[in-house]
Image (spheres, rainbow, N blue to C red):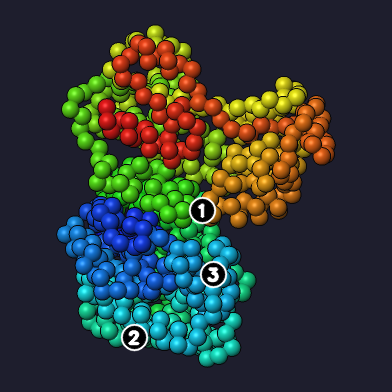
Amino acid sequence: MSKLFTPIKIGNLVLKNRFMMAPMENGLAQIGGEMSEGLIDFFVERAKNEVSIIITGSIAVSPEGRGLPTQLNIYEDKFIPELKRMTDAVHEAGGKIGAQLYHAGRQASQGVTGIQPISPSAIPCEILGNNPREMTKKDIDEMHRKFVKAAERSIEAGFDLIEVHFAHGYLLHSFLSPHSNKRTDEYGGSLENRMRFPMAVLRDIIKVCGEKVPVTIRISADEYLKDGLGFEEVKTICKEAEKAGVKAISLTAGSYDSVEYTIQPMFVKQGFIVPFSEKLKRNIKVPVIVAARLNNAELIEDIIENDKADMVAIGRGLISDEELVIKMKNKQYKDIRYCVACNQGCIDKVFIGQGVQCLVNARAGREKDRKIQKAEEIKNVVIVGAGPAGLEAARVAKLRGHNVVLVDKDDKIGGKLETLSSPPEKETFMLFKEYLYNQMTKLDIKFVQKEIKSAKDLEEFSPDSVIVATGSFQTVPQIKGINSKNVLIAEDVLNEKVKVGQTVAIIGGGLVGTETAKFLAYKGIKVHIIEMMDAIAKDIGATFVGHLFKLLNEYGVQQHVNAKVEEIKEDLIILEDKEIKVDNVIIATGYKPNDSIVENIKDSFKEVYLVGDANSPRRIIEAVEEGFLVSSEI
């Protein structure tokens, strides 16, 4: 048997395999931090699917330490009964659950808590732009007591393990890091001084836990900041934590000021923390747990089989596929629905106060309500369009027992997935296409290449239900000279259907425009982005946008904001205040539904549904969700 599926001991706690659900914010608790049924269902679903231990997202030990409106709380006794209800549910489902105790520190927001944040030094968080105050010694003593009291409550609430948050720029980590700790007293300066408060908290938590539950820490292996906490000091901290009595160390990376290393998007290498876990294992004796973009079965197996870590902590991969552990155990590799690291549903939604969603898994966060159940009446379901919405609709309809035919004018599936994966660092979108293709093959879904122009073209399939998933097409703005030979459509450029000159102007600075700019600038083409709004990239998430601007700057992409195009000429684009010499003008200004066949089909068939961009142009996450929901009801 693979070592992945052998038990491991963390202190006196025996875990059935080497899979931990990493602590991730999920936004499923109620606003204010009260328990919700959705959160319990979310954890229970993973426990039922053989995740050995689930670590909650951060649980606040003090009111001003809450970073998000939907984080759980443990700073008063009143929270214990509902936390106990959650731990009982996970235990009943066959899993274990650990509490991650934290205080957001300088990464808390007064907008969430109504209280000024506290920090070792009064240094604002770059992302939040907040105004923390420097902690007094009285504050430090009080916070020390709150952490220890939170540990006592965790035991009472039935948690199997306590993880103390030493990572990601939160309060204890911000004391450890020279980036955020500029104190000149006994809590700042040398590593010994910077460790003083976090280690005192840790020792006393270990003392109150005794033999009841093991205590672990989660720590950033590297903060990825010039003046941040680096691995050499982290090794020393881990050795001290081991001496203090921690039973395992869980490695992560980054802080809010280097957020791309905390919640890694597509452009961060898979398994980039693994070299750190290998080195740490040579320095300590307790188990080492590693995380960070472990969205590949071969990589996960290699880590454990070759002793690069003792456990894997997987967050987004268990959001994207709640059955990941079972599928790996049964070697059903082609059935794994891998995380594509887009961060659109799991992080971008949670950061704005919504519950977790997932681009590739429409059930995520709605496990109880969105079950795939056998249909009461078997129907002939015809799906027009083999993009993400159509493919998901076909998968779900087939699983429910319907007779499914998938029709597309092209001889391949995937719709815009290939276009999306064309720019640099976006290739993991193809993981979802591979999954959908594998499911289509496994379920023996019939595919027919045919262009559907009217209801008559569907008659040979005798449909009871028709799902229109024909996508969208790019809009062309009404600009003088728009029909010039040098004007191109962004999708044609990304799909390399057209040739582009050495200097281009892209009209539109949203997601498509900026990704097209990256795609071309990477090839050495001089790019200008023309945007009517006051900034580009307004529709791009927090974990991507900083890296995007960095790349555009490195590539020399010129941004023209608050800019209106007056005219396009064969070698020129004319703005209100300037003229730019260009070889091509590329349109990236928006989309319209490709729904011209809908009314004709509705006149001929009783059940007609629109999903994805054919309904309204948006992102893949909404398209997949609509495909799932429509087929769930047929």
Q: Is residue 129 visible?
A: yes
Secondary element type, mark 3: loop
Going 26% across and 22% down the picture, which residue do you hit? 403
Q: Residues within 10 Å of mark 1 (few under 14, many from 20)?
A: many
Badge 2 amino acid: Asp
Q: Earlier in the sequence, mark 2 or mark 3?
A: 2
Q: Position of residue 598 (x, y in %)?
A: 43, 18
At numbered mark 1, what does the secondary structure look like: helix, strand or loop? loop
Q: How many angstroms separate mark 1 from mark 3 (CA)?
A: 16 Å
Seen at 55% across and 63% down, the residue is 128
Name the residue beneath numbered marker 3: 223
Q: Is residue 313 shown to the viewer in this render?
A: no
What's the residue at 68%, 25% (across, down)? 478
63 sits left or right of 537 in the view: left
Determine which residue is flagged by label 1.
265
Q: Are marks 1 and 3 in contact (CB under 8 Å)?
A: no
User: Residue 366 location, x and y as percent?
Assistant: 30, 46
Quarter occupied by residue 230:
bottom right
Are the two marked residues, 2 and 1, in contact with CB atoms closer than 8 angstroms? Answer: no
Q: Residue at x 33, y 57 (%)?
A: 30
Give the alpha-carbon distance from disc 2 to disc 1, as whole Å: 36 Å
> Given this view, does label 2 or label 1 mark the residue nearer the observer?
2
Q: Which of marks 1 and 2 precedes in the sequence?
A: 2
Q: Amino acid at mark 3?
A: Glu
Residue on which disc 2 sits: 204
Instruction: Label 2: state its secondary structure.
Output: helix
Which of the marked residues, 1 or 3, is nearer the chain's N terminus?
3
- Image location of residue 484, percent across then percent down: 75, 23
Alpha-carbon span between mark 2 and mark 3: 26 Å
In terms of image quadrants, where is residue 37?
Answer: bottom left
Could you classify mark 3 by the number of other residues whose Cα lies within 10 Å: few (under 14), some (14-19), or many (20 or more)? many
